[in-house]
Image (cartoon, grey):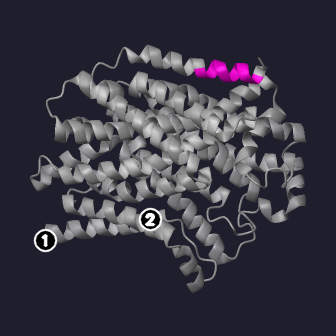
Amino acid sequence: MTSLASGFIFYLVLLLLIAILSSSRNKTLPDFLLAGRKLGPWVVAFSERASGESGWLLLGLTGLAYASGLGDPTGEKLEPALWTAVGCFCGLTMAWILIARPLRIASEKYGALTLPRYLEVRLGESSGRPSDPLLRLVSTAIIAFCFTFYIAAQFAAAGKALQGAFGWEPWIGTLVGMGVIVLYTLMGGFLAVAWTDFVQGWLMLITLVVLPLVAISELGGFGAVSERVRAIDPELLTLSGGRSATVLWSGIISGFAIGIGYLGQPHLAVRYMSLKSPDDVAAARGIAVSYGLLTYGGAVLMGIAALAWFGEEQFAADPELMMPAFALEVFPGWLAGLLICGALAAMMSTADSQLLVTSSSFTEDLYHQQINPDADQQKLVRIGRIVTVVIGVLAWILSSYSDSSIFNKVLFAWAGLGAAFGPPMVLCLWWQGVTRNGVLAGMISGLVTVLLWDNLDANAWLSSQIEGLRLYSLAPGFLVSLAMTWGVSCTEGR
């Protein structure tokens, strides 16, 4: 057995061991879905960051920086690597400030285990609808639709990481990744997910910080790396990428639009809800923000270091294969195996969270609240596990038949969730005037805007009106959702 395989197998055994140890503690649905709200700030912060970053960071953003530098002098990329990293860092900070503490307090006050349930009870308080099947159905359908694409992207990332490490066919890698993720989520529930995220979060942090720094040292330092990259194209290391003003501002706005998506991600919201106490939010926020600064900066730095190391041609066909090959070039096999596990960690920690959130929406919001309110706790846990398997299989099938990149799959799902839930969430937590119909209008219009923007190629029309102008679909989707939520709520409040 090679040292690379040994490191990989050790990692998988560790994950399954955590799941086995956690499984005996899932006696009720709150245990399975939120770990009984008993998690401390370090575990929650690392779990939130590991879940929020996913395979798109380890393979997608690093590959983007490798292919196009800081600002993409070609102008082909809608979201340049640098402005994507800056926008995401600002967005995660905003989410911890605006969402974390008020949602932790409100979800416990209403006894809500899921985001749809929180919205239902919060809005039922003002609308006189203690039960709202339509609101539950719409929010659950949006979560299931978007997360199926999102989970498929993580399985595809697993296939690429294992292809780069072992030369496996991509479908074998996606199947292995799907099997391990579904198994430990099935066994351990949220407690296993949170603790595996904690372990995986450290692996991701080490991979994104240590790998580029060691590579830069071997290349002769930052000056040598800069010299090599400038020899390829001097604009690769400029903040503007040599773009025109319109193209530059399109990239900056789109990068920050990715960031505001953090306000509406259900798999991150449940992390805030699982904290032991609202008083732990400040500590968890400090840890999460520091982690985000290191990892987003490390991802861009890794892409630049790989460009200096390999040149621009080696991964031109698929830049997302760069990171596993880079680890194998820089480190001995056993350590490279652990760092490649960092890429797997990123996708696993996101996929397990999304599987659990989708499962909880079906189990708690549809089956328990709508179909069988008298179901006992053991039956609810069993239903949750069945849904976990079904969603996992559907996502694996989708990952096998979709040709789009990991980065694009994630951006589509991220936009749909951010536009549908971001404005309603912020307004529900900070404005008493929001109404049930306003939230419904905001969720539906936000998602529909993203779907139309992406599928009708609205950016081609924009560019024809103002040369070089393009926008990530979350930007118009978020604005439409905000306007509809606010406007309908104000109209009803008169």
Residues 275 and 68: in front is 68
Residue 383 picture quarter = top left
Confirm whether residue 300 shows in the render: no
- Position of 228 with respect to 336 (left or right) is right
The residue to which callout 2 is attached is: 450
Residue 113 picture quarter = top left
Real-space Cα separation, disc 2 to disc 1, in angstroms: 30 Å
Q: Residues within 10 Å of mark 1 (few under 14, many from 20)?
A: few
Where residue 297 appears, as percent x and y from the top left, is 66, 46
Q: Is residue 221 magenta?
A: no
Where residue 195 appears, as percent x and y from the top left, is 48, 24
In the rendered structure, which disc, 2 or 1, sits on the residue that comes first in sequence?
2
Mark 2: which secondary structure?
helix
Confirm whether residue 484 shows in the render: yes
Mark 1: which secondary structure?
loop
The chief SS type of the magenta part is helix
Residue 482 picture quarter = bottom left
Name the image quarter holding the C terminus: bottom left
Look at label 2 and name its amino acid: Val
Q: Residue at x 86, y 52 (%)?
A: 311
Where residue 304 appears, as percent x and y from the top left, is 77, 50
Q: Is residue 8 magenta?
A: yes
The residue to which callout 1 is attached is: 494
Where residue 292 appears, as percent x and y from the top left, is 57, 42
Provide the residue span drawn in magenta.
Answer: 4-12
State if disc 1 and disc 2 touch (CB < 8 Å).
no
Residues 224 and 299: in front is 299
Residue occupying the far left of the picture: 128
Vertical arrangement, residue 217 with respect to residue 428, above or below:
above
